[in-house]
Amino acid sequence: MKWLKHVTTALALLGGLVLIILCTPLVLWWSNWLSGDWPLDLANDPAKDQREILIVLAGGALDQGILGDNTYGRCVYTILAYRERKYKTIVLSGGSTGGPPVSILMRDFLVSHGIPQEVMVLETQSRSTYENALAVKPILEKLAGRKVLLSSDIHMYRALRVFRKAGMEVSPRPFPEGLKRGSRWRGRLPVFFDLVDETTKILYYRWQGWI
């Protein structure tokens, strides 16, 4: 029966793809490509004492004002970045996904981990990376100093190019979300789907002329 042969072929191809995802460094290569250049030795960076602004873009949120996984990761690495460099200003960008603006949830989380509220500036209207850039631009125009964009390795390619396309010169500071999760075979399949989703968004943004 032809249909059975087609089903068998499809299952074999699917199984082969899963084996490639789980047993090769495909997701690591892909994540690394999207992240671009990593910061050098930040501890010995000659610019570390300059006035710097850290820009952190919100991800999603769960019900009842709880940070989503990707937003939580960005907050954790914001805390680590601040402890390392003491950024003069942290710009948090993210609007509502049905509850409180995500940037407010991020601020509360960061304050609970010792970052002073007075160093944070909030943008509470945007709901996408493109809107993040448009909403943050007038804020950054009022702040002197080097601008540093923090996001995950998977998200950095799109985020960096959206900001630069909007006329802002920002330095990338990716953190290893995809690389970390994909370092173990059990995490590679979810990372693969995240990479497919992000690459689809990149293609859409390029089609729209946003990057």
Image (cartoon, rainbow, N blue to C red):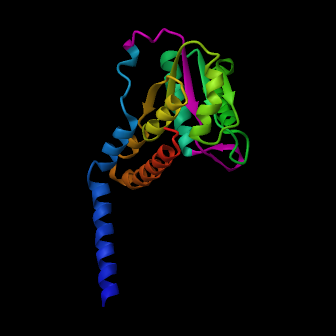
Res 79 → quadrant: top right
Residue at (42, 53) in percent of width and height: 196
Q: Is residue 108 visible?
A: yes
In the image: residue 21, left or right of residue 169: left
Relative to 112, say whether 24 is above or below: below
Residue 1 place in picture, x, y as percent: 30, 91
Which residue is situated farthest in the bottom direction here? 1
In the rendered image, is residue 114 in sight? no
Q: Position of residue 164 (x, y in %)?
A: 50, 29
Instruction: Measuring from the top left, give residue 166's x and y in whole percent.
Output: 55, 30
> In front: 142, or 116?
142
Q: Does residue 23 sit above or below 133 in this rendering?
A: below
What's the residue at 33%, 67% (across, down)? 14
Q: Position of residue 118 (x, y in %)?
A: 68, 18
Please determine whether, in this image, residue 185 is positioned above or below residue 93.
Answer: below
Between 94 and 135, which is closer to the camera in this rendering?
135
Q: Nearer the viewer, residue 57 or 200?
A: 200
Q: Is residue 47 magenta?
A: yes
Q: Which residues are magenta?
A: 44-68
